[in-house]
Image (cartoon, helix red, strand yellow):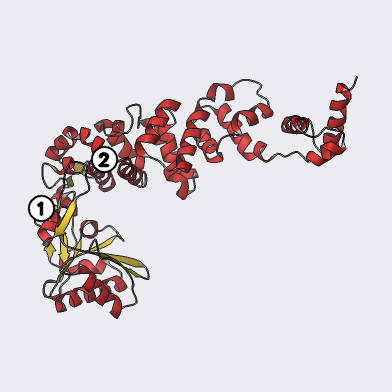
Amino acid sequence: MPFTRINDFDRRLSPSLSAIVRLAGARAQQLGFRLYLVGGIVRDLLLGRSNLDIDLTVEGDALALAQSLAHNTDARLTSHRHFGTARLKYPGFILDMAMARKEMYPHPGALPTVRSGGIKEDLFRRDFTVNAMAVSLNPDSYGALIDPYGGKSDLEAGAIRVLHPGSFIDDATRIWRAIRYEQRLGFHIERTTLRQLRRSLAMLDTISADRLRREFERALDEETPDKVLRRAWRLGVLQKLHPSLRADRWLSTKYRLARNTAVPPLLRTIYTALLVSRLNPGECEAFLSRLNFPSHTARIVRDTVRLRQLSIELRAPRLKPSRIYKLVNDYDGVAVNIAALATNSSTERNRLRLYLDRLRHIQVSLGGRDLQMLGVPAGPPVGLVLRKLLTARLDGKLKSRKDEEDFVRRYFAKLTP
């Protein structure tokens, strides 16, 4: 695999970004600090891939450097003194700056405790060797690759490798990240790392619901999340979210359809609902609880599963439009769209599309006051008549306001002795 010469790495940056990182390195050296470009952007620059996540690590006072840089440029600075981090917002890109640190995990699944350290210690706390490289930005060593753990060799071999045997035990979310990077980059999880991953699956139970959900959502944000989920399924990782989940050929087909038809902001929710759509309602609730989904997403997923339970009724012969409306109308419209995508029955799909495209937009012309003027008593009878009018409208028996008025008169004439 060909690599860009590291001393030419900033040629892959935009001119404005290149100018800023050079300026930052020069200012760090003036202050007696060492500044490095770290993490995924180094990996992707070596691979010739674009990456706009620009992380800088400082051996020294990151906040002082950020403040100095902001003072001399047009950056908007946000700093977090307690964490020793800062964010510099420029037109077109953002620099995230942090002090070099080392980490200790009090117990498996816990967030780490941190204290200041050197660049080698900072890189050691990363998840995989390919993400544990840095590039010096100081003028006296500008462009030098810092690679103490063999990340460049693993890039050339296409290998995802953890930095130490306890990596997945310290933080089991790395299991999901290993699979994501493997599928995104077209790499393979190195043999020993894969063995450690398999042995550490139980450690996923030590991860909080919110952290686990965020890793799951990052998987769904990949360009082809079905590949990530399929690999996770084959490794038994997906089943740690719920044992009944499957990422098979059916799911890949549905995900491709979603990518071709859905609005991008909804894709994550659609992917989640499709994955869960073959569970029963009880299994669905267990999954939603395990990952602590926000209420709006949970409702769409829940409604999708419930709609799939109506599949037999929605395929019944000679189903009236009013019956379709009654079966479907209480569910979220996004969930109805997902159910139409999920079904393999053209009859069911067409009826769900009929609801979405036409039936849900049908309204009765008459209101409660109109009905009272036609002699309908106030109270429950008004609601009853409105429902009957809507049913007749849905089934095409009434076309106009006059038809509705005549319907009401006939209806009450039958009730009059």
The image shows residue 134 at horizontal and vertical percentages of: 16, 61
Crowding near pointer 2: few (<14 within 10 Å), some, many (20+)? some
Q: Which mark is residue 207?
A: 2
**Residue placed at 49% from the left, 38% from the top?**
299
Question: Relative to 161, does residue 252 appear above or below in the rendering?
Answer: above
Q: How many marks?
A: 2
Going from N to C along the chain, the mark reached first, 2 or 1, is: 1
Q: Which mark is residue 291?
A: none
The image shows residue 165 at horizontal and vertical percentages of: 11, 41
Whether residue 319 is visible to the viewer of this picture, yes or no, is: yes
Left or right side of 220 for 372: right
Q: Which mark is residue 150?
A: 1
Q: Nearer the viewer, mark 2 or mark 1?
A: 2
Pick out the residue farthest to the left: 148
User: Under tag 2, what secondary structure?
Assistant: loop
**Residue placed at 40% from the left, 41% from the top?**
293
Q: Quadrant of residue 21?
A: bottom left
* Amino acid type, callout 2: Ile
Question: Relative to 138, does residue 390 appear above or below in the rendering?
Answer: above
Q: Quadrant of residue 213?
A: top left
The image shows residue 42 at horizontal and vertical percentages of: 21, 60
User: Under tag 1, what secondary structure?
Assistant: loop
Image quadrant in which the C terminus is located: top right
Pick out the residue farthest to the front: 379
**Residue placed at 17% from the left, 49% from the top?**
128
* Amino acid type, callout 1: Gly
**Residue placed at 26% from the left, 31% from the top?**
236
Residue closer to the observer: 181 or 56: 56
The image shows residue 397 at horizontal and vertical percentages of: 78, 30
Whether residue 315 is visible to the viewer of this picture, yes or no, is: no
Left or right side of 87 for 102: left
